[in-house]
Image (spheres, rainbow, N blue to C red):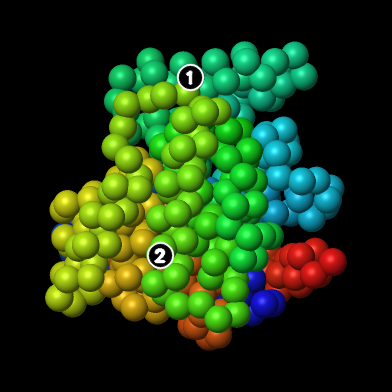
Amino acid sequence: MYKKILGGLLGAAVGDAMGAATELRSIRQIQETFNGKVTDFCTPPEDTIAKGRKAGMVTDAFSIPYILIQYKLKTDAGFSTEMAQKALMEWGFHEEWFELFAGMTTRKVINRLKEDSDKMSDWAYAGHLGNKLFKGHYYALSSNGAATKAFPMGLFNPGDLDKAIDDTIAVTMSSHDDKYSISGACAVAAAISKAMEEKVNAYDIVQAGLYGAKIGEEKGAKVGLHYPGPSVQKRMDMAINIAVKEGTPDMIMKKLADIIGSGPAISETVPAAFGLFIANNGNTMESIFGGVNIGDETSAIASIAGAIGGTYNGADSITSGYQEVIEEKNGMDLSDMSDKIYKYISK
């Protein structure tokens, strides 16, 4: 259990840090910039969001859930919208992450919370999130930020998919208040919850993800706002059909990028991550490499794929020495965090 927890944390961190260098590039541009496929930590080029950061440093994809876990362990608070809002505000005070990597949705939410969180009612808060409509491009409405911070709820609820889903809905409403964001986040949390079980296989994990997407969309429709957008569950079905067909993992990666997409919409990020997990037979590092090289939102996709694979296979499935790199470059102690999570869920 401890190795699964550490594997989930480390897989998510490695995927994020490795994907920081390839973020927003196409598959072809990645190959041209790095002279082929990226399979190690690289220094982000000067024309990327992560410019100036060292190889192995994480972005918001891992730092937000990391702070969320820290906050839960520190306060012993249950997963709730209010708890997640406070954790988001705490993350917002880390300038090395917030100023560089806060996306359109997260930045607006945190800045508003900093201004008058004590005065804002739940309805006013939901209405503020709802004004994302003014952006005029729907991909930003159901964005992948909800999915990258969903894996902690799976770690804290091993084998209890429904509890993981309910906790994820509460946390997701802190920053993404539509049914598709909720659906994608629940898919990730449910898959991680299933992966925490002792006897489980890749098929079981994918089925758990589909269950999470289905229940998340149903429950999300009752508590969240209704934005136009594609169903995460249906696009996961599409990704699965692509991934199980004959072809090399790299061929499948390109098909996923072409047909599903690898952009910031949660209906692209989550299906792509699951597709890569399937295409690589659940192998942790190969799934991460797929996310790093698929193009566009590489940090988010690789982080989710790494979290699923790492939880499934355990910490030993991740390249030796990578934990030391992550911890040194980011001032983190993932072993200590894993130990605290293990003790928490073993109470």
Residue identified by numbered label 2: 206
Tell me if 299 is positioned left or right of 72 in this view: left
Tell me what residue is drawn at x 83 percent, y 50 percent: 76
> Residue sitting at 55 percent across and 28 percent down?
223
* Sequence-wise first label, 2 or 1: 1
Quadrant location of the N terminus? bottom right
Q: Secondary structure at mark 1?
A: helix
Q: CA distance from mark 2 to mark 1?
A: 31 Å
Residue 61: in sight, yes or no? Answer: no
Please, is residue 204 above or below residue 93 in the view? below
Quadrant of residue 246 in the image?
A: bottom left
Closer to us: 104 or 29: 104
Q: Position of residue 125 (x, y in %)?
A: 61, 19
Classify the position of the C terminus by image quarter.
Answer: bottom right
Query: Which of the 4 image quarters holds residue 33?
Result: bottom left
Horizontal and vertical percent position of residue 210: 40, 55
* Residue drawn at 28 percent across, 72 percent down: 279
Residue carrying label 1 = 130
Where residue 343 sits, quadrant-wise, is bottom right
**Amino acid found under the numbered disc labelled 2:** Val
Element under label 2? Answer: helix
- Residue drawn at (61%, 25%) of the image: 111
Q: Residues within 10 Å of mark 2 (few under 14, many from 20)?
A: many
